[in-house]
Image (cartoon, grey):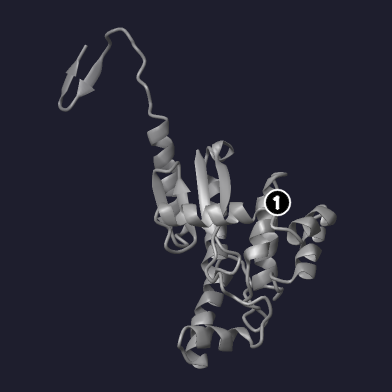
Amino acid sequence: MNIEVWSDFACPFCYIGKKHFEKALEKFPHKKEVNLTYKAYQLNPNAPKEMKEDAYHSFARSHNMSVEQTKKRFDLFTQTAKSVGLTYRYDLIQMTNTRDAHRLAKWANTFNQEASLTERFMHAYFTEGKNLANHETLLELVESLGFDVLEAKNVLESDLFEDEVNNQILEGRQIGVQGVPFFVLNRKYGISGAQDEAYILQTLNQLWQEQNPIQPLDSQNSGSCKADDCDI
């Protein structure tokens, strides 16, 4: 079973949706048959590389909202995150550009570690208030996982994986991704948003049953019942 997920490290519901999906997958009897692929998406491709104001004022300005309205919205995000064991620190969050972080994620995918780097980046962004556009910060996060810092530095100082990030963003648009997180299951079903664990598990089971229908075996005539009639 192939599952692709479009997400952005700076998306609050992407991190929440990731946790919902992981919990559902743990309960899925055939989880070892699932192949998960992360796809790049940028909520704000024009985001700056350095913050000149805090997250409250930045979001309020860009969304034509008051700071008070923004704080109320962020409080809702924070409470929802808390329900799945996450800590969101909007007093620390730096709403900067995630392009280079996505390029590093694609680099990590070359040695099957995109999932772990994705988790590290999201935690760094929402809980630690790290600037994911800052190269020094990104390299520190890479090093914290024991990955090759020199290779990562080479990625950041070049345009490596730029095309892959662009192509994945374009691919998402072509299949109808308008918001994230967006999960695509076997290119047949799409799950939009941070749906709850039960819904995701139900969808996984449904897809598995469609892929693996029960095949009746040929057998000799024997007693059976149909409707209100039984024959021997």
Which residue, as the protein is rendered here, is positioned at the far left? 228
Specify whether 69 is left or right of 117.
left
Residue 142, horizontal then vertical, whole percent:
78, 59
Q: Does any portion of residue 141 appear in the rendered image?
A: yes
**Which one is in front, 26 or 10?**
10
- Given the image, on which type of amino acid does mark 1 rest? Trp
Outermost residue on the top side: it is 220
> Residue 116 at what x, y percent from top left?
69, 54
Please tell me which residue lies in front, 67 or 82: 67
At 35% from the left and 19% from the top, the residue drawn is: 216
Is there any visible trace of residue 26 in the rendered image? no
Task: Give the side of residue 197 with respect to residue 188, left or right.
Answer: right
Left or right placement of residue 49 versus residue 154 in this view: left
Identify whether 120 is placed above or below 212: below
Q: Secondary structure at mark 1?
A: helix
Q: Which residue is mark 1?
A: 107
| Rendering quarter of residue 110 | top right
Residue 98 drawn at (x, y percent): 63, 67
Q: Tell me the crowding category of disc 1: few under 14, some 14 to 19, or many 20 or more residues within 10 angstroms, Cα based.
A: many
Residue 1: image location, x then y, percent: 50, 38
Q: Residue at x 67, y 48 (%)?
A: 109
Quadrant location of the C terminus in the rendered image: top left
Q: How many marks on residues? A: 1
